[in-house]
Each structure stands twice: as structure tokens, then as C-alpha cells.
Image (spheres, grey):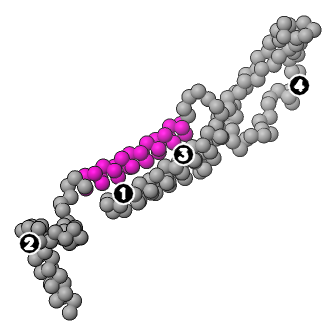
């Protein structure tokens, strides 16, 4: 049977020696409940006293800010460098964002190892998913920008002439090729005159 504490020296719980004090913040209040074990769970049919100590414990955020959130924000900002790459170079633009996306996924696995296996999403899970969705939107934007560029692109005069020359159709190309050829020759003459 539990006996009430008669010594004032032991009337409190010392939280200063908490082994995981760097990771968790202990609450101020402690609730202690006493009960008895079930005699059916004992081989001898005996009853034992149980003391349940309940305390509010919160995870400190410093580790998560400096090791997960800030690096993730820096990675997401790096993915905006894809907008500095020419729209024609879709593979280069996507390589930037896909590399960042893979890094975020790898960091997600590191975070998952640090968290307990729970049935709901934590705030850090929502943050990671938000970063991944932003990467996906950037990849979709890069693809749409390339598609819009291809749809609205006018034929390049030099590529028309080059194709006609390669296919030996400069004479059969007609008036369009002749007009483009005259413009290109005039432009080349002007550039040549400016260089001399």
C-alpha cells in the first residue's frame, strides 16, 4: 500500500536531471494516480500497487528549426534558380527542380526516422508536403512554359533554309525560301560590312 510522503525534502519531483532535457520541455504540473494490478495477470494471483505519473512533455523546436526547416527553406529557394535557365532548355530547368525534389524526399526520410510512428500528420509533415507540392508546381510550370513556347514559336528562317539545303530543295522551296535567303544574305553582308 502507498503511504503519503511525510518528508518535505521529497515533496517534489526534480526535473533538473531529466536525461532528455535537450530535446523535451517538461510541464510544470505532475499528476500521480495509484491503483492495483489485476490478480488474473499474476501467476500467483497476487495484487501489486501501481503508481502512474502523468506529466505534460513538449518537444523543443530548436532542433527542428535549425536542422529541418531552415535547410528545407533554403532548398526550396534554390529551386527558383530554374527560372533563370532558358525556357528552351527544359531538361536543364527540370534537372534543377528534380534534384531539389529528390533532396527534399531524402530529408523527409530523415525526419520520419526522428518522429514516432503515429497515425496523423505533424506540423513538420505538413511543411515537408508543402515543399514537395511547391516543387511539383515548379516542374509543371517549366513544362507548360516550354509547351507555350513551342506552340507560339514562329519558324526560324535559318532553320528553313538549312533544312532545304540539307534536303537539296533550295530550288523547289519556292518564293518563301528565296525571300528568306535574300534577307539572310543582306543581313550577312551588313554584319560583314560592320565587322570590316
Question: Where does residue 176 sit, x and y in percent of width and height?
Answer: 9, 67
Which residue lies under the disc numbered 4?
7
The residue closer to the viewer here, 2 or 38, is 38
Question: Where does residue 181 sit, x and y in percent of width and height?
Answer: 13, 75
Badge 3 element = helix
The image shows residue 100, relative to residue 125, as above or below, that is below
The residue closer to the viewer here, 126 or 66, is 126
The residue closer to the viewer here, 150 or 52, is 150
Q: CA distance from mark 3 to mark 4?
A: 55 Å
Q: Quadrant of residue 24?
A: top right
Q: CA distance from mark 4 to mark 2?
A: 107 Å
Q: Is residue 44 left or right of residue 130?
A: right
User: In this view of the protein, can residue 113 be seen by the observer?
Assistant: yes
Q: Residue at x 31, y 60 (%)?
A: 88
Q: Is residue 157 left or right of residue 131?
A: left
Q: Which numbered mark, 1 or 2, is in the foreground of this view?
A: 2
Task: Tell whether label 4 touches label 3 (CB within 8 Å).
Answer: no
Badge 2 element = helix
Quadrant the N terminus occupies = top right
Which residue lies under the disc numbered 2?
179
Q: Residue at x 30, y 49 (%)?
A: 144
Mark 4 residue crowding within 10 angstroms, few (<14) / some (14–19) / many (20+): few
Mark sitting earlier along the chain (3/4): 4
Residue bounds of the magenta highlight = 123-149
Mark sitting earlier along the chain (4/2): 4
Mark sitting earlier along the chain (2/3): 3
Mark sitting earlier along the chain (1/3): 1
Q: CA distance from mark 4 to mark 1?
A: 75 Å
Which residue lies under the disc numbered 1?
90
Badge 1 element = helix
**Residue 105 — which label?**
3
Q: CA distance from mark 1 to mark 2?
A: 32 Å
Amino acid at each position: 500500500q502507498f503511504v503519503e510522503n511525510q518528508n518535505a525534502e521529497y515533496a517534489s519531483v526534480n526535473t533538473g536531471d531529466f536525461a532528455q532535457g535537450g530535446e523535451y520541455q517538461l510541464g510544470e504540473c505532475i499528476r500521480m494516480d495509484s491503483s492495483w494490478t489485476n490478480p488474473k495477470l499474476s501467476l500467483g494471483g497476487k495484487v501489486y500497487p501501481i503508481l502512474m505519473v502523468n506529466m505534460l512533455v513538449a518537444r523543443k523546436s530548436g532542433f527542428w528549426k535549425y536542422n529541418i526547416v531552415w535547410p528545407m527553406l533554403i532548398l526550396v529557394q534554390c529551386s527558383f534558380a530554374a527560372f533563370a535557365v532558358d525556357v528552351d532548355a527544359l531538361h536543364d530547368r527540370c534537372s534543377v527542380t528534380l534534384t531539389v525534389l529528390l533532396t527534399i524526399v531524402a530529408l523527409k526520410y530523415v525526419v520520419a526516422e526522428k518522429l514516432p510512428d503515429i497515425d496523423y500528420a505533424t506540423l513538420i509533415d505538413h511543411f515537408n508536403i508543402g515543399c514537395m507540392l511547391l516543387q511539383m508546381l515548379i516542374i509543371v510550370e517549366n513544362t507548360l512554359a516550354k509547351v507555350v513556347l513551342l506552340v507560339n514559336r514562329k519558324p526560324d528562317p535559318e532553320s528553313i533554309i538549312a533544312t532545304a539545303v540539307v534536303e537539296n530543295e533550295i530550288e523547289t522551296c519556292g518564293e518563301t525560301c528565296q525571300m528568306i535567303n535574300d534577307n539572310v544574305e543582306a543581313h550577312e553582308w551588313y554584319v560583314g560590312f560592320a565587322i570590316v
